[in-house]
Image: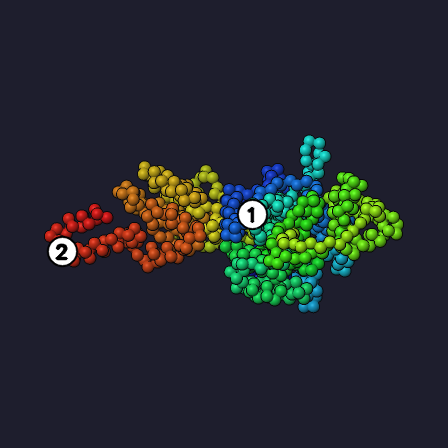
């Protein structure tokens, strides 16, 4: 996308991402990180296939996510189904409310747009207009910020106010209509069971809360994670991996006591200084503010410590995965944008070529989900904690005798009626009783997954009483803090934030002109792109490169290579071997495009050393970002790469300083690493002190005893 098309709300850094995007797109497609699915059939919008390097990057990102959250935060993990029955998603509200507003071209019903996104684009264009005044810009920013919070009526008014027409034809737009985003699918041969592809992974966690709580020995608080596919029939999928119809989510539901939302590890993230965009700043069209999480929680900007803790951990994860810290901010949902049951909600937005893009949602969802599923299934989804001091609880409800009579009268519907009465307050029950006494009966409407039904209850069945109970154990429905990660969106940010183009390395020889009849190299006209993935995320941790084809033809090479491959596999490292006839510079460039952080080069010296003594063989290890090289023992190089690619404290700079930073001879560096230098020095010192008649014999005996 050209820089001129950038949203006005984006920064110059985001514009730089947009400028590089065409070259990045070429690299991604050429090296098959991902491509449009079903491409040979023409493709279908909103579906993408990850190729070998792209699938590896994605799986490594998920492995890092599990390490960062599931392991480090001691979470449980479930793996629920992709298809869910109607009742589950009706109860959760998705059947009725999981909608976006769609507008259509009145002259061509096959042209349609998602209303809020079209409004955002119009506002961005107005802000980009040179004639836009500061006052108008503030006005447009406010409309832009609230676009996805408007109702259908509000959208119609705003579209009329700004004269928004169909972008392509200029015709009038139809009024905004709700469009449900779920994919419906029948279940079973008869198709009598209505199902849907799940629109989120969260519901599978709520449905299994009871069983996970049991496995956690009923201890609170605790968290459950799930990673998997989600499906949404997007109105206008576009922007590559940003808005797909099938995508990967990684979600956490962290269950807490409603009044106990402090977190024992909050101090570990409290000092983090983050860019925050609270709702008051958005409504006033003001910029983000920078403050610590501790300050944000203390001021009430972030609702509680547990929410703040996951905001901090999310930031750390994104940076660890390869996103640039200066392009990450957290935006609070506006009051009209937030779900009615949510206490507070923040989005981790990452700036990329499209501007600021929501990639993670971190919400305090209160007790909504567990409450509605418990009500619909008559299953207690609660936790228990002993009171420090017993508590008296007064209750006003049906008498035991009336409850039994209700069961006989309403039979299969008795649970639904009794459940509704149990939810009502004392004042509501007394008003219902007064109506029954006046009219001999009272009407009660029950709405749940069984439908919406009205029951007539005779006056004699409505007998209520006040009771007092001494409670030793508190039973409560937990609140939940939910971090929800859009993995594909995060991947898009990682690709953009790690991509760069650099000049050819100084020692790389010029490529010879292609011979007649040679197959054209698809990378010949491409810019030398580099994907500087963090080693933990990189698709392959290293590439094994013979210096040239003369090395490959040596009879010892195959055995040396296979032994190296075995040690790399033993270390659990993903790797590639490139034995093509291209120059070493060309093959370095190929591995840089794939984001491979390290290259092991086998040269003539390595072969000579291997022939003389396999244990003494050394090879060069090249680092992708600096292009610097060090020479290491071949026998330990796999272990060194493993240390560099894991959470080990070993860094490239430390390794470089030990072996090449001071210009030390590689042979001397090898002797130092293997402890030979130290042993020799100690032996020479002892020899001078002892002064034996036969120094060589004395040294031989000393080393034989080691």
Point out which mark residue 166 bears.
Answer: none
Quarter where residue 309 is shown: bottom right
Quarter where residue 86 is shown: top right
Q: Does residue 526 sit above or below 559 in this rendering?
A: below
Residue 295, visible in the rendered structure: yes
Q: Where is residue 407 in the image (x, y as percent from the top left)?
A: 77, 42
Q: Do callouts 2 and 1 mark residues in contact (Cβ within 8 Å)?
A: no
Residue 509, visible in the rendered structure: no
Question: What residue appears at the point 18 percent right and 50 percent down from the top-left corner?
Answer: 699
Residue position for label 1? 217
- Which numbered disc, 2 or 1, marks the residue that appears first in the sequence? 1
- Between 522 and 480, which is closer to the camera in this rendering? 480
- Between 644 and 77, which is closer to the camera in this rendering? 77
Q: Which residue lies furthest to the bottom in this view?
A: 134
Residue position for label 2? 691
Q: Position of residue 348 (x, y in %)?
A: 59, 57
Q: Around disc 2, counting alpha carbons within 10 Å, would you say few (fewer than 14), some (14 to 19), or many (20 or more)?
A: few
Measure the C-alpha gap from mark 2 to mark 1: 72 Å
Question: What residue appears at the point 68 percent right and 40 percent down from the top-left corner?
Answer: 85
Quarter where residue 16 is shown: bottom right
């Amino acid at each position: 996308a050209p820089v001129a098309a950038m949203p006005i709300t984006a920064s110059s850094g985001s514009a730089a991402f947009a400028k590089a995007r065409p070259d990045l797109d070429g690299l991604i497609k050429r090296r098959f990180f991902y491509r449009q699915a079903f491409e040979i059939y023409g493709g279908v919008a909103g579906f993408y296939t990850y190729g070998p390097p792209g699938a590896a990057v994605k799986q490594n990102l998920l492995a890092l996510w599990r390490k960062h959250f599931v392991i480090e935060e001691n979470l449980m993990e479930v793996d629920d189904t992709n298809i869910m029955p109607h009742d589950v998603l009706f109860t959760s509200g998705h059947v009725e409310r999981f909608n976006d507003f769609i507008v259509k071209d009145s002259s061509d019903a096959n042209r349609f747009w998602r209303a809020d996104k079209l409004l955002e684009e119009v506002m961005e264009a107005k802000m980009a207009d040179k004639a836009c005044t500061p006052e108008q810009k503030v006005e447009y920013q406010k409309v832009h910020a609230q676009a996805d919070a408007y109702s259908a009526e509000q959208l119609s008014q705003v579209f009329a106010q700004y004269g928004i027409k169909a972008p392509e034809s200029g015709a009038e737009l139809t009024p905004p209509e709700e469009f449900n985003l779920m994919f419906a699918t029948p279940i079973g041969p008869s198709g009598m069971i209505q199902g849907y592809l799940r629109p989120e992974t969260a519901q599978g966690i709520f449905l299994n809360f009871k069983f996970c709580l049991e496995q956690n020995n009923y201890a609170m608080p605790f968290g459950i994670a799930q990673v998997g596919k989600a499906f949404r029939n997007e109105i206008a999928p576009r922007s590559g991996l940003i808005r797909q119809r099938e995508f990967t989510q990684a979600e956490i539901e962290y269950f807490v006591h409603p009044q106990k939302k402090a977190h024992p590890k909050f101090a570990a993230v409290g000092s983090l200084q983050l860019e925050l965009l609270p709702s008051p700043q958005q409504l006033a069209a003001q910029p983000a503010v920078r403050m610590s999480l501790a300050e944000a929680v203390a001021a009430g900007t972030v609702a509680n410590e547990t929410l703040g803790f996951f905001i901090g951990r999310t930031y750390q994860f994104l940076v660890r995965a390869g996103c640039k810290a200066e392009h990450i901010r957290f935006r609070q949902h506006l009051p009209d944008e937030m779900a009615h049951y949510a206490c507070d909600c923040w989005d981790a937005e990452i700036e990329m070529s499209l501007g600021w893009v929501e990639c993670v949602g971190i919400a305090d969802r209160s007790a909504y989900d567990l409450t509605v599923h418990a009500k619909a299934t008559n299953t207690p989804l609660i936790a228990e904690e002993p009171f420090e001091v017993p508590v008296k609880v007064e209750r006003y409800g049906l008498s035991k005798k009336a409850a039994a009579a209700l069961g006989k009268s309403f039979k299969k519907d008795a649970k639904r009626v009794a459940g509704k009465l149990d939810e009502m307050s004392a004042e509501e029950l007394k008003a219902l009783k007064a109506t029954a006494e006046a009219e001999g009966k009272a009407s009660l409407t029950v709405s749940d997954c069984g439908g919406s039904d009205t029951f007539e209850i005779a006056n004699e069945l409505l007998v209520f009483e006040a009771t007092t109970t001494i409670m030793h154990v508190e039973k409560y429905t937990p609140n939940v803090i939910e971090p929800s990660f859009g993995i594909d969106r995060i991947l898009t940010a990682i690709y953009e934030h790690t991509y760069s183009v650099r000049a050819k390395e100084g020692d790389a020889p010029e490529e010879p002109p292609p011979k007649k009849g040679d197959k054209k190299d698809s990378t010949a006209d491409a810019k030398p792109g580099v994907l500087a993935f963090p080693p933990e995320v990189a698709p392959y941790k290293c590439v094994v490169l013979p210096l040239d084809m003369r090395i490959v033809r040596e009879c010892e090479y195959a055995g040396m290579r296979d032994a190296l491959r075995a040690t790399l596999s033993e270390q659990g490292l993903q790797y590639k071997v490139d034995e093509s006839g291209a120059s070493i510079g060309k093959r370095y460039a190929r591995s840089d495009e794939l984001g491979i952080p390290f290259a092991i080069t086998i040269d003539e010296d390595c072969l000579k050393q291997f022939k003389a003594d396999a244990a003494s063989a050394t090879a060069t290890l090249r680092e992708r970002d600096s292009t610097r090289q060090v020479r290491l023992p071949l026998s330990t190089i796999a272990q060194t790469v493993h240390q560099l690619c894991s959470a080990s404290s070993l860094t490239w700079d430390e390794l470089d300083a030990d072996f090449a930073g001071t210009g030390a001879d590689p042979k001397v560096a090898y002797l130092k690493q293997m402890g030979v230098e130290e042993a020799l020095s100690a032996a020479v010192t002892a020899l001078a002190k002892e002064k034996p008649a036969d120094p060589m014999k004395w040294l031989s005996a000393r080393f034989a005893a080691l």
